[in-house]
Amino acid sequence: MIKFCKTCLMPNTRPRIEFDDAGICNACHTAERKNTIDWDARRAEFLEMVEPFRNHDGPYDCVVPWSGGKDSSAIAYRIKFEFGLNPLLVTFSPLMPDPVAQHNREEMIKLGFDHLMVRPNQKVSRRLSKRFFTERGDPKIHWNAGVNAVPVQVAAKYKIPLIFYAEHGESEYGGRVLSDDHMKTRDFTEVLEHQIGDDPLNWMDDEIEEHDIAPYTYPDLDEVEQIGVKALYFGYFFRWSMLDNWNFIKDKIDFRTAKNGRTDGTFTDFDSLDDKIDNLYYYMQFVKFGFGRCVRDACRMIQNGQMTRDEGLALVQKYDSEFPKTYHDDHLEYLGLDEASFTEIVDKHRDLEIWEDQENAWALSHPPE
């Protein structure tokens, strides 16, 4: 039976989420525990941990996986200007780059950052997007692999000993937390299981060869360990909030937001702006699991005390089911699909425990409440 968290709005259809007997999800319990953390002590722990990585043999102290969005930009800014480390910003190119994000990246780079972007073979990328959209209802499977693999590839190649990721998603948003240390240190084996969940070697076919999947392939873990690469979650040491990150970075650079005043499917205009295909990605999350981008955004703000549940529910009822029309024609062209084929694929991924056909129109069998 589908149920919704009594504190936020997340349903139990979110993969790996857990609810207690009172009907409260583990993401809300994580948020509650934040109020008991000594954040000054966490900051001191951060300073102690990064000190050995300053001024090592190479030119960069750390890698920051960087989309150019509010979260990774806030991290990069603080690491460089607040803590005095010299980061290399590493971007795995979005599938369908948005000019808004390009502008925001340029504004950050102007402040004095070095930046490396990897843009893989676009013929291969589009083929994989179409395949994964068709088979799994997710056009970004390979991108998720690349965005996880490339920063580690770069750290290993240039012998950069430290990587800063944003937040530990499994604890922050509800998932399977293997240990307390996993919330601080990024475990590469956990990433392969939770973030990628597939071996890129399985993607080869009559057109895609082994060298084509190099950008999506993790480096040998023995090599990573030999170099001593350590990956940390910034959100472990400093209280994590997407709204706070946005308020921070918008005062530092000319950070542009969604051109329509908000993003399809939600009430925010400042999140996940780098890739046009994200609108479709979050819509397919709604199709497959019964919650969309608005539930995601509202839950994060509810958990951080920035919105009430009733306020979030009103927004969810208004926006969560919205079709991603802004870039729809671009999506069809990128995936090489006509409207009928697109609709057929979308409907194939509907879970009939979540959806019911009401007079030739799909409706959630258990809407948020």
Image: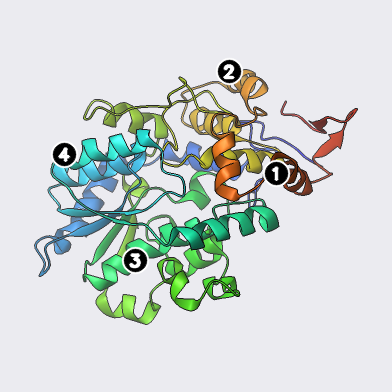
Mark found first going from the N terminus, 4 or 3: 4
Image: 309 above or below 336: above
Q: Of the two numbered discs 1 and 4 on the same chain, state the one appearing first in sequence.
A: 4
Tell me, for residue 311, which label it has, or none: 2
The amino acid type of the residue labelled 4 equals Lys
Counting residues from the start of the chain, the first of labels 1 and 2 encountered is 2
Q: Earlier in the sequence, mark 4 or mark 2?
A: 4
Amino acid at pointer 1: Phe
Secondary element under disc 1, as helix, strand or loop, is helix
Please tell me which of labels 3 and 1 falls first in the chain: 3
Question: In the image, 62: left or right of 166?
Answer: left
Q: Nearer the viewer, mark 1 or mark 2?
A: 1
Q: Give the colouring mode of the picture.
A: rainbow
- Contact flag, marks 3 and 1 (Cβ < 8 Å): no
Task: Report the amino acid beneath label 2.
Answer: Glu
In the visual, does 302 lie left or right of 40? right
Kindly state the secondary structure of the residue where label 4 is placed: loop
For label 4, the residue is: 110
Q: Which residue is nearer to you in this view: 258 or 73?
A: 258
Which residue carries the number 1 mark? 342
Of badges 3 and 2, the one in the foreground is 3
Query: Where residue 322 sits: x, y (%)?
Result: 64, 27
Mark 3 or mark 1, whichever is nearer to me = 1
Cα–Cα gap, marks 1 and 4: 40 Å
**In which quarter of the view is residue 43 placed?**
top left
Q: Tell me which amino acid carries mark 3.
A: Val
Residue 21 visible from this viewpoint: no
**Residue depicted at x 19% and y 42%:** 109
Residue under pointer 3: 152
SS label for mark 2: helix
User: Which residue sits at x=55%, y=32%?
Assistant: 299
